[in-house]
Image: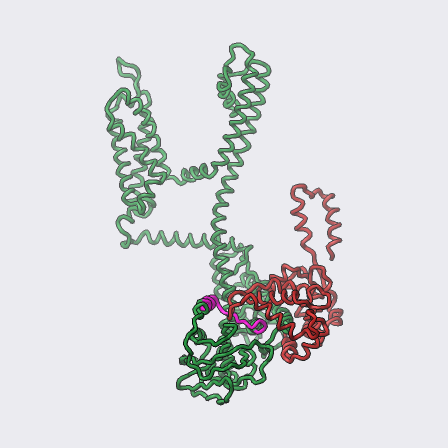
Amino acid sequence: MRGQGRKESLSDSRDLDGSYDQLTDSVEDEFELSTVCHRPEGLEQLQEQTKFTRKELQVLYRGFKNECPSGIVNEENFKQIYSQFFPQGDSSTYATFLFNAFDTNHDGSVSFEDFVAGLSVILRGTIDDRLNWAFNLYDLNKDGCITKEEMLDIMKSIYDMMGKYTYPALREEAPREHVESFFQKMDRNKDGVVTIEEFIESCQKDENIMRSMKLFDNVI
Amino acid sequence: MAAGVAAWLPFARAAAIGWMPVANCPMPLAPADKNKRQDELIVLNVSGRRFQTWRTTLERYPDTLLGSTEKEFFFNEDTKEYFFDRDPEVFRCVLNFYRTGKLHYPRYECISAYDDELAFYGILPEIIGDCCYEEYKDRKRENAERLMDDNDSENNQESMPSLSFRQTMWRAFENPHTSTLALVFYYVTGFFIAVSVITNVVETVPCGTVPGSKELPCGERYSVAFFCLDTACVMIFTVEYLLRLFAAPSRYRFIRSVMSIIDVVAIMPYYIGLVMTNNEDVSGAFVTLRVFRVFRIFKFSRHSQGLRILGYTLKSCASELGFLLFSLTMAIIIFATVMFYAEKGSSASKFTSIPASFWYTIVTMTTLGYGDMVPKTIAGKIFGSICSLSGVLVIALPVPVIVSNFSRIYHQNQRADKRRAQKKARLARIRVAKTGSSNAYLHSKRNGLLNEALELMGTPEEEHMGKSTSLIESQHHHLLHCLEKTTNHEFIDEQMFEQNCMESSMQNYPSTRSPSLSSHPGLTTTCCSRRNKKTTHLPNSNLPATRLRSMQELSTIHIQGSEQPSLTTSRSSLNLKADDGLRPNCKTSQITTAIISIPTPPALTPEGESRPPPASPGPNTNIPSVASNVVKVSAL
């Protein structure tokens, strides 16, 4: 099931049947190794680990497997899928951030378990869990606090998704101003970074945010 | 939006949670999934073969037969399944399209049957996947050509009076099957070409002796007869050339074409001979000119398709032929040198110089072996045999390369042209799909207000007006709407954007005060006031069609002292109730209220009378009156 086992058997077979060809081995290699398949754990285990019902997991997996028959999503695939929803803008940067947020073990690919774990937090977790997840998304280097540069990157990526044809026309300073207002709201002790406690505290005080966090509850 | 990706829409919507803490304004409500039923299997009975699939699979493409309510027409109440009296083989491909998002074309299927099935199910053939697209297009082209040929042969019986005389003539020349006259002309010219070539050949045959002189070739013995034949042929060719020149649609191009050059070269010697005097010195040169008469045989290439293909082959394989020539030359020079020095020692050797040895090398390498030059020394014989062996290789190697090159180049050329055309079409399709989906969103935004306005009227039957988007589409649009709210900007299409750019550049003049009911600094949050939907807003129903106009008219509004000259005419700002509890997060700047008159489009007022909204005095009061339809817009 994993890549390593296949690699070993590959080298053996190459010597044996003489299909190893000096001129073309690189090409054959690529073809052989790309058919890695990943199977998720059983339905019961996933039911325990996440807060989805059995039916919901079934629906999720069917959609997941349809788009990624190999069972895992890599970053390119992910970006491509996400860009289909935002035809006017460039969603690749934001998709990268999302990918990093879902890829909790940082192995460069999102398996169904990662996918479902992330969704379980977003859709079925408590408000605090969700805020935690959002904080994790913004904290690009995962050091526990959001700096202005990280926030600016995130903001720019969100604005990139709007594309060029917006009303009013997008100005260069718009993301920066947005970041400033964000920090004004969130950064209690004005030390230039937003920690997780400040973030959660400020969000809990904001009705809008609280309400919008529950907006997508019935998505599945 | 691609099919399988629709399954990821829930994920994209969930991921939108990342925008929530960043947004300053509240988000729009999610579209309610009114008919949320469990995913069920539906049975499709196609001529007895039963296919089963999930209902949501079919709903991925709502604009096809199976994805829309059109399939209800085929629902069989007794057996609780959908029955289609169509070909089950092709249906397999159609259903796979819903499942995988890719439409394939099975090779064994007839192209017109396949097209018919696709048309029945409401699927455009353009979305055939890359793997099968070339095959599909090839078959389609063959079919179209076949139809065209059929049409042509039908048309040939009819007369086409619309063509001018000149065009008819040209058609007759190019395609001898168009009319009997053209066919006759074709055969006559062919006959005369043959006659001319044969006379050229027979002229030189010795014809028996006239007593008292040496053997003469026929040409000189019956010179008068041959001259007459030659004249006749040349006259025919001249007439033909002039006729073609007259009928050609583009004379300049015709003169430059290869065939006309051959024609000219073929008849020139005769005229030159007429003009020239019977001068002994010059007639020697004249005789050589007669060689050019043999070019008349090339005129046959108009009559023979094969000759034309051969000519094209040679032209297209020029580089390979050049390589062959070059390698041969190299080998010849090497071997000639070697043979010369090898045979230098032997007496009475024919290998007098290296150029003289060239002849031997060529003859040996092409395995001709005339035998007029043979090596005598042992070294010479050894090298001679090496030369003949290598000759076989040197010649045999490039020739298949040329042959395969020719077929490869020929097919590649065709495929490259095909691919270029397909690429353009493909890019156009992708662009259309992209603009289609973004236009769908913009379109639904305008309709969305109508729906909300109607919903608030509380008339249930009118709710269904304009609810043409599927659930997936409305969810996608909700997602885009959330993004708009997060960034406080709106999606518009390209033309509007350019318009706004032009207008904003024209807005730098301090203009006169606009007529305004009240202008004072205040806080208005255009986005936030949308939350309050309790009031009824008649004017909104006018907006969808006239929003464009309103934006144009806004450009004439004077904006006082706003640091950010960003106009946000949100439809929502037309709401009467100004939010007193204004969100402190939103941007603040001075506003100017102004009057815009919006004409009522008659189609969009579904209600008989209008209810005047409660006139609440507030900083931004809109008092629309039905009579004048004056609406106020607060601009940021």
Q: Position of residue A139 (x, y in %)?
A: 69, 67
In the depicted view, which residue is nearer to us: B583 or B331?
Answer: B583
Q: Colour of chain B?
A: green
Q: Main secondary structure of the magenta part?
A: helix
Q: Colour of chain A?
A: red
In the depicted view, which residue is nearer to us: B598 or B165?
Answer: B598
Q: Position of residue B95 (x, y in %)?
A: 57, 64
Q: Is residue B148 left or right of residue A142?
A: left
Whether residue B210 is situated above or below residue A170 in the rendered picture? above
- Asked whether B359 falls inside the magenta stretch, the response is no
Q: Which residues are magenta?
A: B485-501
The reply to whether residue B293 is in sight is yes
Q: Residue at x 56, y 23 (%)?
A: B387
In the depicted view, which residue is nearer to us: A91 or B411?
Answer: A91
Q: Position of residue A1 (x, y in %)?
A: 73, 57
- Asked whether B488 falls inside the magenta stretch, the response is yes
Q: How many marks?
A: 0
The reply to whether residue A85 is in sight is no
Whether residue B16 is situated above or below residue B619 in the rendered picture? above
Q: Residue at x 45, y 36 (%)?
A: B314
Q: Quadrant of residue A98?
A: bottom right
